[in-house]
């Protein structure tokens, strides 16, 4: 089981839940995880990735504390039991 | 009693103002906080009117939503109202224009960044890419203005569904006379002084186009330097900038009830984006651009540094018509006498990006 922790602003797109538990196959990636999220909560997934499947520029995904962008991006591995944080980056004026 | 809604899109959210007399206004709380509101529209083809908003979050991306209860609640499809088809390998950045059709029931048009036109046939819930413009051979050469590459102006014809005009910065105007099946550059006479050929077929930095209320072939164009009029539906343009204190600006609005009457908000120059003489002045023509009159009463006339962006000036559909101007200083002003006198609707808002108004009750 992998637990995805959502920022407050995205919880409205996950029936109000602060976390979403996802079952992933061994060897799954951040891309696989987001695909599963898209199946369950398409409005949520659209806030995280654009229609080309790319992570939005100012959205960060951390897998057990490691920034996925520094670990292969959407190809970053998601070990079984990992905690995945979706966070807005520091941006804006 | 007339109930007028004024939708104010700002850099950090949407404010809905309501008034019975267009002097006293009640303002909603800020909706969509921290979203840039790049376009709003009020579709009065139904009662209550359907509102549209283009909201863009720096973090969470763009959305186009609609409301059938005058902004009490908003809806959008889970997959989003607008997305580029997979084969385009393109991502939707935001909508810059939302335009209900005057001739086709349930049709709503949207102009997007990157430059594309979308059509909805379910009254703005779902939009489809207009391939004919996307596949235009000029598209690879369209540039990007400071605000991005976008179709920011969409002008459906008021009586003929076959005819339409769109415009973009660093690309120019394009018209269709066959229902959007094909598009022709529509910039003859409009200068692009910043290009090696200053009078190219396309590439002009058009900032906004408005259509005369009495003559649908008469158009007013605010260019990146240059103010023009067309009397042949955009085939050719001639300058009407004489009499203005500057030919730079973003907004141009046609009077909704008086033919040959239009309004602009001049800005000193490309390199000096401040109002001339540091005064907040709307300019009005009553003879299709032959002469211009400064409108100042009720607007700040000293030490004023605000400017008005391309969609931050509009008219309502009441009688007499109301005019509205929103500034980058976060002020909104209204006039019900064709600009002779202005009163303040709101102040201290974030930068105003767009305003639209209509009678809603």
Image: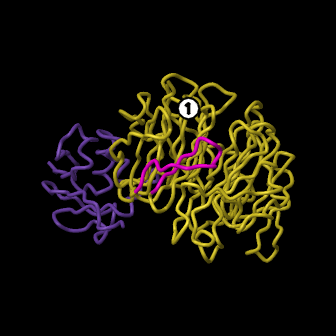
Chain colours: A purple, B yellow
Tell me: B178 left or right of B304.
right
Write down the quadrant of residue B187 in the picture. bottom right
Q: For the point 32% across and 40% down, which residue is it?
A: A39
In this rendering, the count of numbered labels is 1
Tell me: A74 left or right of B340.
left
Question: B226 or B327, which is in the foreground?
Answer: B327
Where is residue B220 shown, x and y percent of the image? 75, 51
Write down the quadrant of residue B15 in the picture. top left
Where is residue B217 shown, x and y percent of the image? 82, 42
Q: Which residues are magenta?
A: B331-347
Pointer 1: residues within 10 angstroms few (<14), some, or many (20+)? many
Outermost top residue: B47
Question: A33 or B21, which is in the foreground?
Answer: B21
Where is residue A55 shown, x and y percent of the image? 37, 59
Q: For the point 75% across and 36% down, which residue is it?
A: B179
Q: Chain of mark 1?
A: B
Asked whether residue B345 is drawn in magenta, I would say yes
The residue indicated by pointer 1 is B43
Write down the quadrant of residue B173 in the picture. bottom right
Determine if residue B71 is in view: yes
Where is residue B175 shown, x and y percent of the image? 77, 47
Q: For the point 21% across and 50% down, which residue is it?
A: A8
Question: A45 or B350, which is in the foreground?
Answer: B350
Residue B215 vertical placement versus B268 (above, below):
above
Determine if residue B186 is in view: no
Q: Secondary structure at mark 1?
A: strand
Asked whether residue A71 is drawn in magenta, I would say no
Residue B2 vertical placement versus B329 (above, below):
above
Question: B53 or B341, which is in the foreground?
Answer: B341
């Amino acid at each position: 089981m992998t637990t995805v922790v959502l920022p407050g602003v995205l919880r409205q797109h996950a029936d109000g839940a602060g976390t979403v538990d996802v079952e992933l196959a061994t060897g799954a990636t951040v891309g696989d995880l987001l695909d599963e999220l898209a199946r369950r909560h398409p409005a949520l997934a659209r806030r995280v990735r654009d229609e080309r499947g790319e992570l939005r520029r100012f959205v960060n995904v951390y897998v057990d504390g490691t920034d996925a962008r520094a670990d292969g991006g959407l190809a970053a591995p998601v070990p079984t039991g990992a905690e995945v944080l979706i966070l807005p980056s520091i941006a804006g004026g | 009693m007339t109930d007028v809604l004024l939708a104010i899109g700002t850099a950090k959210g949407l404010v809905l103002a309501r008034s019975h007399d267009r002097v006293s206004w009640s303002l909603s709380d800020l909706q969509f906080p921290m979203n840039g509101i790049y376009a709003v529209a009020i579709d009065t083809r139904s009662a209550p009117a359907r509102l549209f908003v283009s909201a863009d979050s720096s973090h969470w991306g763009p959305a186009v939503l609609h409301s059938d209860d005058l902004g009490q609640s908003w809806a959008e499809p889970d997959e989003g109202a607008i997305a580029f088809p997979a084969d385009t390998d393109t991502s939707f950045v935001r909508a810059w224009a939302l335009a209900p059709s005057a001739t086709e029931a349930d049709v709503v048009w949207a102009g997007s960044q990157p430059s594309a036109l979308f059509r909805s046939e379910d009254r703005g819930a779902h939009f489809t890419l207009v391939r004919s413009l996307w596949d235009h051979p000029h598209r690879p050469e369209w540039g990007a203005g400071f605000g991005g590459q976008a179709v920011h102006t969409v002008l459906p014809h008021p009586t003929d569904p076959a005819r339409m005009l769109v415009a973009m910065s660093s690309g120019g105007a394009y018209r269709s006379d066959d229902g959007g099946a094909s598009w022709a550059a529509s910039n003859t006479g409009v200068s692009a002084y910043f290009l090696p050929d200053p009078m190219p077929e396309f590439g002009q930095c058009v900032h906004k186009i408005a259509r005369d209320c009495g003559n649908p072939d008469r158009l007013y164009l605010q260019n990146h330097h240059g103010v023009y009029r067309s009397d042949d539906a955009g085939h050719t343009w001639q300058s009407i900038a004489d009499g203005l204190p500057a030919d730079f600006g973003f907004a141009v609005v046609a009077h909704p009830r008086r033919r040959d009457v239009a309004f602009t908000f001049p800005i000193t120059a490309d390199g000096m984006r401040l109002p001339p003489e540091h005064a907040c002045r709307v300019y009005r023509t009553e003879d299709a651009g032959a002469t211009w009159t400064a409108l100042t009463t009720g607007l700040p006339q000293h030490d004023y540094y605000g400017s008005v962006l391309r969609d931050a000036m509009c008219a309502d559909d009441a009688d007499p018509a109301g005019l509205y101007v929103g500034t980058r200083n976060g002020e909104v002003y209204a006039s019900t006498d064709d600009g002779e006198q202005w009163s303040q609707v709101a102040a201290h808002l974030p930068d105003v990006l767009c305003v639209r108004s209509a009678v809603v009750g």
